Image (tube, rainbow, N blue to C red):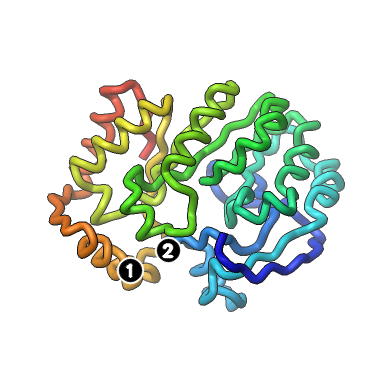
């Protein structure tokens, strides 16, 4: 783990309503994220809102040390039909979770309720908490895997877990009987929209046991475009790669076709 500025804070609320179509309430036990992925939309939102730390995203994390206590209190007023998403604005299983264990504490509190829970993460640290995950009746894990090529990962998300680590997380969750999907998100333009990368991604997903893939595009492209193009140029210089890029319609068609060949449900 790289050097981070860590601040312990106490929050008044942890459950926040969301307008997202895939959940009604979000939980983020941390503010900031040590992974600091280059395409993350959160610092863009912080900058638009005038919140501090957008320029140094990935270098600091605030730990909501009382998160489990707050969840215990707030869940008393939450409908049992409410769908809860963990990790909408940070990775709840980023490296410092190994030390603070607040996300594990939140899971423990939620495990006493029948609510549907979705976890979004890219961290193999979640393997540690499989014992708690198995207590839930309605739980799914979406693992963010924007690429299965380590050379790509090292350029666009150098501080995030390796591809191999995410594959191992996938296999361990599936072995435990936990619904697990891959989020091909964000879909990296100029890299993943090639026949080679699409075939490789779907093949690796199938070998890992994945049966469902969600494909999503980069958020706030206008704000991220300059930095993204710089990283894309770096990747191409490092690899000497001259890609044959597919157009958007061609990309979506090929992704669907390749997934259908191996029996993977694809949502774009």
Give the secondary structure at mark 2: loop
- Circle on res. 11: none
Residue 194 is situated, as x and y percent measured from the top left of the image, at 20, 46
Against 77, residue 259 (above or below) is above
- Circle on res. 225: 1
Q: Choose mark 2 or mark 1, whichever is in front.
A: 2
Residue 217 is situated, as x and y percent measured from the top left of the image, at 37, 52
| Residue at the spot 73% in from the left edge and 69% down from the top edge | 7
In the displayed structure image, the side of residue 83 where residue 22 appears, left or right = left
Q: Nearer the viewer, residue 12 or 244?
A: 244
| Residue at the spot 38% in from the left edge and 59% down from the top edge | 156
Residue 196 is situated, as x and y percent measured from the top left of the image, at 20, 41
| Residue at the spot 36% in from the left edge and 64% down from the top edge | 221
User: Where on the picture, by quarter, is residue 90?
Assistant: bottom right
Q: Which residue is mark 2?
A: 38
Q: Nearer the viewer, residue 4 or 75?
A: 4
Q: Nearer the viewer, residue 148 or 227?
A: 148
Distance, label 2 to label 1, CA atoms, is: 11 Å
| Residue at the spot 53% in from the left edge and 44% down from the top edge | 21
Q: Quadrant of the N terminus?
A: bottom right
Q: Quadrant of the C terminus?
A: top left
Q: Earlier in the sequence, mark 2 or mark 1?
A: 2
Asked if the residue under mark 1 is in contact with the one under mark 2, i.e. CB atoms within 8 Å, the reply is: no
């Amino acid at each position: 783990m790289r050097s981070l500025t860590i601040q312990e804070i106490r929050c008044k609320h942890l459950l926040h309503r969301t307008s997202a179509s895939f959940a009604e309430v979000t939980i983020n036990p941390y503010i900031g994220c040590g992974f600091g992925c280059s395409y993350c939309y959160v610092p863009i939102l912080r900058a638009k809102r005038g919140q501090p730390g957008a320029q140094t995203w990935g270098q600091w994390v605030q730990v909501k040390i009382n998160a489990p206590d707050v969840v215990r209190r707030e869940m008393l007023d939450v409908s049992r039909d409410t769908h809860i998403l963990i990790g909408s604005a940070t990775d709840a299983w980023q490296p410092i979770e190994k030390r603070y264990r607040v996300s594990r504490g939140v899971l423990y509190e939620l495990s006493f309720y029948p609510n549907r829970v979705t976890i979004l993460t890219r961290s193999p640290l979640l393997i540690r908490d499989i014992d708690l995950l198995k207590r839930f009746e309605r739980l799914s894990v979406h693992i963010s895997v924007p690429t299965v090529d380590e050379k790509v990962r090292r350029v666009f998300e150098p501080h995030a877990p390796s591809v191999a680590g995410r594959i191992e997380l996938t296999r361990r969750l599936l072995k435990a009987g936990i619904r697990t999907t891959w989020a091909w998100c964000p879909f990296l333009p100029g890299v993943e929209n090639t026949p080679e990368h699409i075939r490789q991604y779907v093949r690796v997903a199938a070998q890992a046991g994945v049966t469902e893939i969600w494909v999503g595009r980069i958020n706030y492209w206008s704000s991220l475009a300059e930095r993204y193009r710089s990283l894309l140029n770096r990747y191409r210089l490092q690899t000497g790669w001259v890609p044959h890029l597919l157009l958007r319609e061609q990309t979506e068609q090929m992704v669907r076709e390749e997934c259908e060949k191996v029996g993977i449900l694809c949502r774009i």
